[in-house]
Amino acid sequence: MTTKTSNTFSRSSLKRLPLYLHLLENLTSQGVTSVSCTQIAKEFDLDPTLVRKDIEMTGEVGTARVGFKIISLISKIKSFLGWDQQQDAFLVGVGNLGKAILGYKDFNKYGLNVVAAFDNSPDKIGTKIFGYQILSSSKFVNLAKRKKVTIGIITVPAVFAQGAADLMVEAGIKAIWNFAPAPLRVPDGIILENARLTQSLAVLTNKLKS
Amino acid sequence: MTTKTSNTFSRSSLKRLPLYLHLLENLTSQGVTSVSCTQIAKEFDLDPTLVRKDIEMTGEVGTARVGFKIISLISKIKSFLGWDQQQDAFLVGVGNLGKAILGYKDFNKYGLNVVAAFDNSPDKIGTKIFGYQILSSSKFVNLAKRKKVTIGIITVPAVFAQGAADLMVEAGIKAIWNFAPAPLRVPDGIILENARLTQSLAVLTNKLKS
């Protein structure tokens, strides 16, 4: 379920950084130049000590009483998350979810550059969606190797997800962002991150019911 | 950060149920009719005791040696998650992410029926996207009250997210699914669930970097 990695940063710490980043970007747009852990903590109902630890992880150092310089903190967080440069990604599975992801242009801000989309269906191959020419999955491995693509996005139905992951591993892809509701097996050293909207929705609909 | 609720089920338990559900649906499609906690646990690298507890939550009871009847378990999980009926939802913010969600038709399977989409921009109001006529946000409160809409989906930029949430609360909406990267304040009793793709992406890109 969780990604195997030698990295020691906790998932929850990593997942808080994007929230801080968005807050900091809002603050700069309002002309604010510095911020304290306590202010950030208050905004998200967190313990200031936790926020301090999260920020220390990025290497940013604050000064007593002034706190953190926002511009410097933003740049440290982006660099720590790898969002200061873009990684090329190939997407496999141009169904509803795949299309939605191709249509969402803001991933560029988060270090992700989707460069090509693949599908098995003859009806889809050769068509164009949001500017992407849909390619046959049979071309995936060669193209990914040639272009040294690092990220693979899986948006196929669950039953085809392992097959897509295997293709990606064969193609030398380093990180898989899996949207399919299927448990995937990948070799050690391959980063696997599951993005599951239905899990978030499950929490909401269950609470709504009770 | 977390939703305030009187509900005592843990988020992590709730978030595992959609995974079990997809596995069970795969198994039925392969003609399998019963399954044990141990089998499910193995599939997801989980402790069988944990899986048993998760399933007990739904009210389903297995039989010794046979395990669980898959059809019955599927129906119990769906009912527990509230996915056996659909709740009407209004979406606010028809940018890239909003469009992606309008274009994704599978939410119907997960208890969510998006019935209308709203935006502030005169360029968007009146246009049609994926079959949805985009309505002016000024109509949100009246329409939501009249149609007794229970779920609000927020896909506006962070800076407008609290305003959208306030509209939803005013309109009597019971649950908010927030995609905006902003911390929201809602009154007690309103369910708030944050769905944040960028958080999942942060884990992936950070690991890729290290």
Image (cartoon, coloured by chain):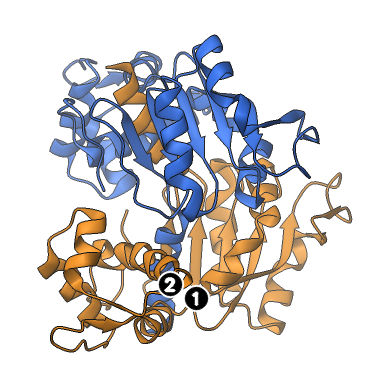
Chain colours: A blue, B orange
The C terminus of chain B sits in image quarter: top left
Q: Amino acid at mark 2?
A: Ile
The location of residue A204, given as percent across then percent down, is 42, 68
- Circle on res. B190: 2
Vertical position of residue B98 compared to residue A71: above or below:
below
Q: Earlier in the sequence, mark 1 or mark 2?
A: 1
Residue at mark 1 to residue at mark 2: CA–CA distance: 5 Å
**Occupied quadrant, residue A65:** top left
The location of residue A74, given as percent across then percent down, is 39, 20
**Occupied quadrant, residue A132:** top right
Q: Chain of mark 2?
A: B
Residue B56 in view (yes/no): yes
Disc 2 crowd rating (10 Å Cα; few below 14, some 14-19, many 20+) is many
| Residue shown at the point (16%, 18%) measured from the top left | A64
Vertical position of residue A66 compared to residue B148: above or below:
above
Name the one closer to the observer, B203 or B24: B24
Q: Amino acid at mark 1?
A: Lys
Q: Are marks 1 and 2 in contact (CB under 8 Å)?
A: yes
Vertical position of residue A170 compared to residue B95: above or below:
above
Write down the residue under mark 1. B174
Badge 2 element: loop
| Residue shown at the point (16%, 67%) measured from the top left | B38
Report whether B28 appears left or right of B208.
right
Q: Total number of numbered labels?
A: 2
The furthest residue to the front? B31
Name the one closer to the observer, B68 or B50: B68
The location of residue B207, given as percent across then percent down, is 29, 25
